[in-house]
Image (tube, helix red, strand yellow):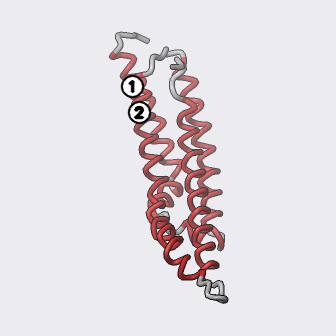
Amino acid sequence: MNKKGMAVELLLFVMIGIFLAIFLAGWIYAVDLVNTNLINIPTNNNINVSQATQGTFSYLNNASDEIAFLPVFFMVAYMLGIFAYCYYSPKSPVWFLFYFMFNILVIILSIYVSNAYESILSTKVIGETLAQFSTTNMIMSYLPVWTTFIGFIGLLIMVSSYYREGGAI
């Protein structure tokens, strides 16, 4: 384990959130596009592609509706992992100032990430697919608030766990 606390973990929380949301929205869009195009292929020579598509790809298309919850699941799990890491990692009080400053930088970065996500959400192609991700949209819209909450609660947990270990500042 690294003894510097968990400054980079908060940055990874922000990046995992936006990467998963955009990647899975692209996945759903591509599966829907392939499914629609395969169903619309005209039949000839006793080959019915639309029937085969409805028997195979339509199940994948139905399952892709449940994928919208995955970014929320990973972000909440990562948040809980950050809290556990803050509690159990050995640390020195020297790194609290570094952690605090890095939190400020990640909060500023999360403002830009949230604005970029909002502009992606307003596009026609991927924005319509991202509209299905209602909880992820709420988290990403308020990403600076979430990042502030997670960062400073993590800082409090780090301070309290240092005192639990018998340390003194």
Name the foreground residue: 117 vs 132: 132
Residue picked out by circle 2: 83
**Relative side of 12 to 116, left or right:** left
115 to 159, vertically: above or below: below
20 to 25, vertically: above or below: above
The x and y percentages for residue 7 are 55, 30
How crowded pointer 2 is (Cα within 10 Å; few <14, some 14-19, many 20+) is rated as many
Image quarter of the C terminus: top left
Q: For the residues marked 2 and 1, what is the alpha-carbon distance in whole angstroms? A: 6 Å
- Total labels drawn: 2
Disc 2 element: helix
The x and y percentages for residue 137 are 51, 60
Name the foreground residue: 49 vs 110: 49
Residue pictured at 44% horizontal, 28% vertical:
85
Q: Which mark is residue 40?
A: none
Disc 1 element: helix
Quadrant for residue 154, please give it.
top left
Residue pictured at 35% horizontal, 10% vertical:
166
**Relative side of 2 to 157, left or right:** right
100 to 78, vertically: above or below: above
Q: Are marks 2 and 1 in contact (CB under 8 Å)?
A: yes
The x and y percentages for residue 96 are 51, 22
Name the foreground residue: 55 vs 29: 55
Residue pictured at 44% horizontal, 58% vertical:
69
Residue pictured at 46% horizontal, 40% vertical:
78
**Relative side of 136 to 30, left or right:** left
How crowded pointer 1 is (Cα within 10 Å; few <14, some 14-19, many 20+) is rated as many
**Residue type beneath disc 1:** Tyr
The x and y percentages for residue 82 are 45, 34
**Residue type beneath disc 2:** Phe
Q: Which mark is residue 87?
A: 1
Name the foreground residue: 168 vs 116: 116
